[in-house]
Image: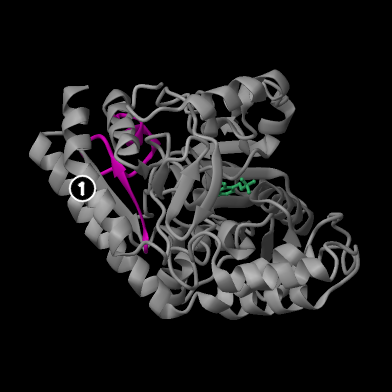
Amino acid sequence: MTSSGRNTFASAALLARARQVTPGGVNSPVRAFNAVGGTPRFITSAEGAWLTDADGHDYVDLICSWGPMLLGHAHPEVEAAVLDAVRRGSSYGAPTVPEVELAEAVVERTSVDAVRFVSSGTEATMSAIRLARGFTGRDVVVKFAGCYHGHVDSLLASAGSGLATFAVPGTPGVPASSTELTLVLPYNDRAAVEAVFAEHGDRIACLVTEAAAGNMGVVPPEPGFNAFLAETCRAHGALFVSDEVMTGFRASRQGYWGLDGAVEGWRPDLTTFGKVMGGGFPAAAFGGRADVMAHLAPEGPVYQAGTLSGNPVATTAGLTTLRLATPDVYDRIGATAEVLKAAASQALTAAGVPHTVQSAGTMFSVFFTEGPVRDFAAASAQDLGAYAAFFHAMLDAGVYLPPSAYEAWFLSDAHDERAVQTVLDALPGAARAAARA
Ligand code: PMP
């Protein structure tokens, strides 16, 4: 048993077995429920908006595999396309048709002229930074505190002792030499950006930012902030790298850029993608300006490669997902988000729990602190104990939220009336549990 009432005997037994052979029993740390306590659920199947765990309990899934499952789990058309691809062989290490078609689909929807496929968001940002450094002949990278870009050495960095000082490693195992070329700034802080470019501008290869921050909870860029970053980079000969691994094809059909640069008339030099564009399989990408992308091998001198890059099964899943993700899919997900945002806020208000709900397109999250939250310092003021109590009460009522207060809540087009009603029914009791925490 855990702090939630549903029995977890099978999950607990699986966790004990997994721990014998895998650190913490999980293959990505947040899955271990360390931030909220209790037994992580081992999932045995999923369909539409629902997950089923090893003990036979069903949950409305508000993680959607941390973003990818825009259409819901086991979507019949995606499943059929994937099975058809698998029957034709799962990897050849040679160019294939679905890669070309997925690249065309990405180019059609976003600001990029060309893309290169990789297998994870981490690889995408790592490669984009290498390309930015190779293209500019400079070494320094600027990032924002609270933005996550995968477990890339140079980006697992915490701010140094002063604004314009270089960063320190965010984890053991990252050498200081990997982060001493990284500058970490507060998000949404124009003065900080101006200060580092004034001091280090001619050494900066690129500034990388989430198109809208989603890894400290959802913290949208303030109006004009991304345009300001793009312009500042341009003025100093640095590249602007927009990380749309989470927001791409989710915040809107064109990603966050569709709500931002596409409207204001600017574009990033490089963009990274992942999650939705892989349709639940390991596929990610980086892309951008044709002249920058031309610096990649084999056209140019910057080396980058991958045995499973552009894998035909993964690219088929991504392509089928993007084709099915028509504008009405985003309208429906956006409408569902509005219903859940209002209901969560109402329940927490009624229970007297300080909170803020923030969005970026169809993405949203609930902060357990009074807002607005515009940077990582504000996000860190959350009442984590209240969130843990809320999380377990929701889980107990059949709703699977992210096991961390610093995450977006993800929806899919399969979140129908029954799924939404299950969440609505769970919220008041969970809000009261948070108030008691
Ligand atoms: N960038 C962003 C914005 C992300 O949200 C993530 C993953 N959450 C990554 C990069 C890393 O992607 P992956 O986990 O596929 O390596």
x and y percentages locating residue 89 in the rendered image: 85, 66
Looking at the rendered structure, the secondary structure element under dot 1 is helix
Q: In the rendered structure, does residue 379 fall within the stretch colored magenta?
A: yes
- In the image, residue 266 above or below residue 410: below
Q: In the rendered structure, does residue 210 fall within the stretch colored magenta?
A: no
Q: Quadrant of the C terminus?
A: top left
In the image, taking residue 268 as reference, residue 88 lies left or right, namely: right
x and y percentages locating residue 318 in the rendered image: 64, 67
Query: Ligand 1 closer than 8 Å to the CB at disc 1?
Result: no
Magenta extent: 362-382
Q: Which residue is mark 1?
A: 425
Residue drawn at point x = 62 percent, y = 38 percent: 155
- In the image, residue 198 above or below residue 306: above
The amino acid sitting under disc 1 is: Asp
Residue drawn at point x = 37 percent, y = 48 percent: 219
x and y percentages locating residue 54 in the rendered image: 53, 37
Which image quarter: residue 25? top right
Residue drawn at point x = 58 percent, y = 57 percent: 275
